[in-house]
Image: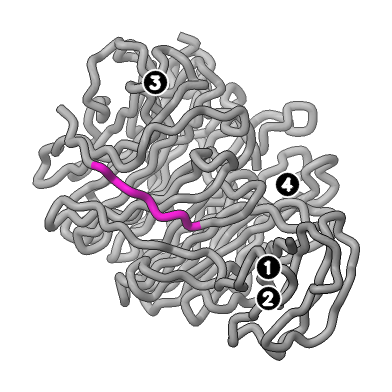
Amino acid sequence: MKTKAIIISFILLNCLHGKAQNTLVSAGAYFEGEPFLAVNPQNNLHLVAAWMGYQLNQKIVIKSSFSTDGGSTWSAPIWQPHQLSSNSSADVSLGFDGNGNLYMAYIDYDNINFTNGAVICRKSTNGGQNWGAAVVALSIASCPNQLCIDRPWIAVDPLTGTVAVTSMNADQPTIVQAPYHPYLSISGDGGNSFQTQILDVAPYLAGSAIRQPMPSPAFAADGTFMALYPSYDPSQSILPRIVEVSKTAPASFYSYQTAFQGLGFGTSNDTLKSGPHLALDPNNANRAAYFFITEVFGDPDIAFIEKNGSTWSITARVNNDSQGNGAIQDLVWADYDTDGDLGVCWRDRRNGISATYQSPSQIFCRIQSNGAWQNELIISPVVTDDSILLESGNDFLSVQFEDNQLYTIWGDVRSGSLKIYLNHYDQNDSTNVVSEIPTLPKVFPNPSSGLFEIPPHLTQQNFELRDARGTLLLNGVLSEKLDLSSFPTGIYWLKVAESQFQLLKN
């Protein structure tokens, strides 16, 4: 769901250059954005990507694709049908459990009048090849005047398989009433049912000043759950705080402590994609890092606080350009590797226009190994700005770090429309691995004067052929060839099962 950046009102306040080439993950002609990536803990060559994408006559849907060879080849996208035909979808996240089951959470909602909406959870037992039935993890009906379904981040306990989905109030001030809360929906039965609770408690209430107290959740390998969320209530603290809430399995209660207190969290520039992110060391539940945007170093920078043991550190700056140079950084995400290294990536404008959001940008990354930060990595070319980056669908990138392989996925407009790109950085030899990732199995030749050959695995399935306006022209069971010789020149849409192809007839 489109949201403004998290802003706390009283804040109102040496690069390693490589020719990193990126893999195009989505091939949609109109809009593909806000991606998420997951790596199977049982097989680190098994990747699953999900994102928001345009689908003919469907508004925005959630699409996903999987790779079983470390990203060299990818499946055709699968898209999730809406709960109601007039709905739209947003904010997808993914999580594997320790047995290789994969869970997906996203919003499906009336994005105009908010008459209905829910956080949907689906389960795949075969690594994203198929998805189970939609389960409502949290409905707006259960939180009147709160619209508590925004940003449903998912985290899955590798020890017990418990599925946790956090969310927050939507940015709809004419509907949502204070006080505001972070929410937690929990499933202990494999995603078949969920119980929801308000995550904040006194004296750690989120309060009435921060309209969207976004929680960021994570599990460690021993089943410890942790989430952080922003809080400001003068009756609790005269300064804003970031609150840590955690539970050590199999304890039945949550403990709370202040992870950060003071000014310096957030930005006064509400165009920035400034949502924070928690990373929890999978093998050390007492080690965590929380990344956010700050302006205390002179301009919008990537900052973090780190927990080692029971206490959190002071704020430190991650990006390594000159302080106060006007360069804007945002769009941050991070992950711990299985060996304890920490990878973080963000969008960086130091090679663009100073102090300007609508500036050419690149994706930068940095790795912390044995407590020391390595040189920055540039993993994308300079990409010109586009007005769509101010809108929904480019609010987050996603990072997965597994066995020294740093995978980063994000959306940019280098091709003229918003599409999803993936970079694979191998920490062992400091190289960016280049591979071609087709989003769709090829229907060829395309363009064609009329005869299109169909991939074998799509034959003998029901299909629909529509023109560019959406008018149904043909349907039935698909054979090895589709003959459009008698059709006028133009664009046609072929839908087979849950895949869709654009055909160009010349």
What residue is shown with label 3?
352
The disc at residue 452 is 2
- The answer to whether mark 4 and mark 1 are in CB contact below 8 A is no
> Which of the two residues, 359 or 415, is positioned nearer the viewer here?
415
Q: Position of residue 348 (x, y in %)?
A: 36, 29
Label 3 crowd (10 A; few <14 / some 14-19 / many >=20): many
Q: Residues within 10 Å of mark 1 (few under 14, many from 20)?
A: some
Residue that badge 1 annotates: 448
Helix, strand or loop status at disc 2: strand
**Left or right position of 459 against 10:** right
Q: Quadrant of residue 288?
A: top left
- Point out the tag, 3 or 2, that comes first from the N-terminus: 3
| Res 106 seen here | yes
On the rendered image, what quadrant is the N terminus found in? top right
Q: Give the residue at x 21% y 63%.
A: 403
Amino acid type at mark 2: Phe
